[in-house]
Amino acid sequence: MADRSKLLLAAELLNIKAVKLQPEQPFTWASGWKSPFYCDNRKTLSFPELRTRVKLGLANLILNEFPEADIVAGVATGAIAQGALVAEELAKPFVYVRPKAKDHGMGNQIEGEIEKGAKVVVVEDLISTGGSSLKAVAALREYGVEVVGMVASFTYGFGVAAEAFENAGVKLITLTNYEAVVEAAKLHQDLADDILALVHESEKTGEPIMRTLEYNDPHKGYAGIVDQFMLGDRYLIAPVLEQGKNSRIVHIPEGKWKRRNVYEM
């Protein structure tokens, strides 16, 4: 079972359709591998609230796991924007690493100011085999800096990647992974029939699908509760909204209830 934070982000990736499934026309990854599954984390940049949550999540990983880092380095091109956002949040210098040195201009592979001996944390958008990510690490090390670790939004969790990172001596921490996406997709599917039934009911009766507690149980002291809602009259939704928290107080209306936390059973 994926932990809460991984499952929540996985669910949000599904919601914005960042996860694609094409069994008949597999995607080709940078590694050359072909897969029916693709996770495009760059789509999070188009959704301000989610973009901010990813930025804060990566920044917190760095603060907790790599507090010694002096500089943030993004891997081109997918992690340039997210890396820059994270560096801004942490008030640290930012550079990015190209797959190879330019064949024109200054001929740089690492763009930005960086001093030899600096401690660098690398930001990636996703990890498949780890090949392109570790090429960036190699370029940084060749330049003369110390790579203290890497953070990424998503990993497919391949054994070949875990082995590659271990062999390279690079600690990798991610916000979510393939397992969490699959789990979140199953949970979405579990509720699909109930949500569809609510849509049909709403079309017939005019009743809203998402309802306040006050709407379902008026005059019982629920009017001031704005951070919980009902999905029809069967599901009570009480998200944990406070950054860094994994629990909250839940106001439960009268009746018999069974715990079924959509994002962490």
Image (cartoon, helix red, strand yellow):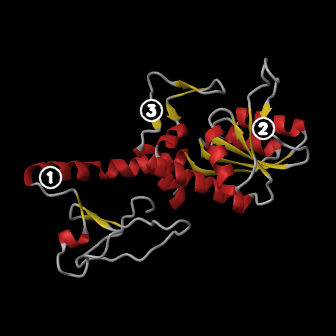
Residue at position x 54%, y 44% in the image: 178
Left or right, 184 with respect to 211, comes to: right
Disc 3 vs disc 1: which is toward the camera?
1
Q: Residue furthest top?
A: 103
Residue 183 shows in this picture: no
Disc 2 vs disc 3: which is toward the camera?
2
Q: Secondary structure at mark 1?
A: helix
Q: Position of residue 135 (x, y in %)?
A: 77, 33
State the quadrant of the C terminus. Answer: bottom left
Q: Which sits in the foreground, 236 or 34? A: 236
Residues under numbered marks 3 and 1 in contact, where contact means CB atoms less than 8 Å apart: no
Q: Amino acid at mark 3?
A: Leu
* Disc 3/disc 1 C-alpha distance (Å): 31 Å
Residue at position x 62%, y 48% in the image: 85
Q: Amino acid at mark 1?
A: Ser
Q: Image quadrant of residue 75?
A: top right
Residue at position x 64%, y 59% in the image: 60
Instruction: Bin the neighbour count of mark 2 within 10 Å (Cα to Cα): few under 14, some 14-19, many 20 and up.
Output: few
The numbered disc on residue 21 is: 3
Q: Is residue 125 above or below residue 180?
A: above
Instruction: Work out whether mark 3 precedes mark 1 in sequence or the reverse, and give the earlier one.
Output: 3
Disc 2 vs disc 1: which is toward the camera?
2
Q: Is residue 77 above or below residue 246?
A: above
The numbered disc on residue 202 is: 1
Q: Secondary structure at mark 2?
A: loop
Q: Position of residue 187 (x, y in %)?
A: 38, 52
* Disc 2/disc 3 C-alpha distance (Å): 37 Å
Q: Which residue is mark 2?
A: 112
Q: Position of residue 170 (x, y in %)?
A: 78, 47
* Disc 2/disc 1 C-alpha distance (Å): 55 Å
